[in-house]
Image (cartoon, grey):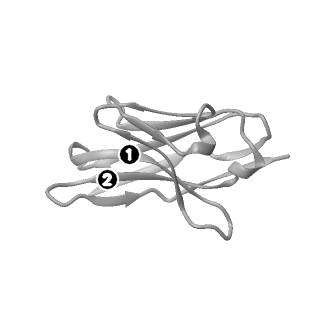
Amino acid sequence: QVQLVESGGGLVQAGGSLRLSCAASGSIFSIHVMGWYRQAPGKQREVVTTITNSGSTNYMHSVKGRFTISRDNAKNTVYLQMDSLKPEDTAVYYCYSLAGTPTPSAYWGQGTQVTVSS
């Protein structure tokens, strides 16, 4: 079992920045991938970015060049630095982890609201 706790959401004007944090606890040794998803009102949850244990990252097209995912292994924490925010980035952001062997399971944080005003 992996527990994920997010923090750092809030209200920001377009063009501004926010940094989200996700602290992992529990069976952290079994984590393969961590990342962030988001869900806007009336829309499906979508993957924003992921980072593997080796540090490989992937980003959805609309956030490339604006968002940066990073991890601090000593603190078991993943960060999402969001710059040049746009109103369409408004959503609930969920921390995500894929952990466990031989069959990995998905774990989710409780979500944190990010609202970007125009």
Kind of element beneath mark 1: strand
Which amino acid type is marked by label 2? Leu
Query: Compared to 20, does 111 lie above or below?
Result: below
Q: Quadrant of the N terminus?
A: bottom left
Which amino acid type is marked by label 1? Met
Q: Nearer the viewer, residue 90 or 12?
A: 90
The x, y position of residue 74, in whole percent, is 32, 28
Q: Is residue 112 left or right of residue 69?
A: right
Q: Is residue 30 left or right of residue 78?
A: left
Name the residue beneath numbered marker 2: 98
Residue at the (33%, 60%) spot, across then down:
106
First reached walking from the N terminus: tag 2 or tag 1: 1
The x, y position of residue 45, in whole percent, is 54, 63
Kind of element beneath mark 2: strand
Q: Is residue 32 left or right of residue 80?
A: left
Name the residue beneath numbered marker 1: 34
Q: How many marks?
A: 2
Q: Are marks 2 and 1 in contact (CB under 8 Å)?
A: yes
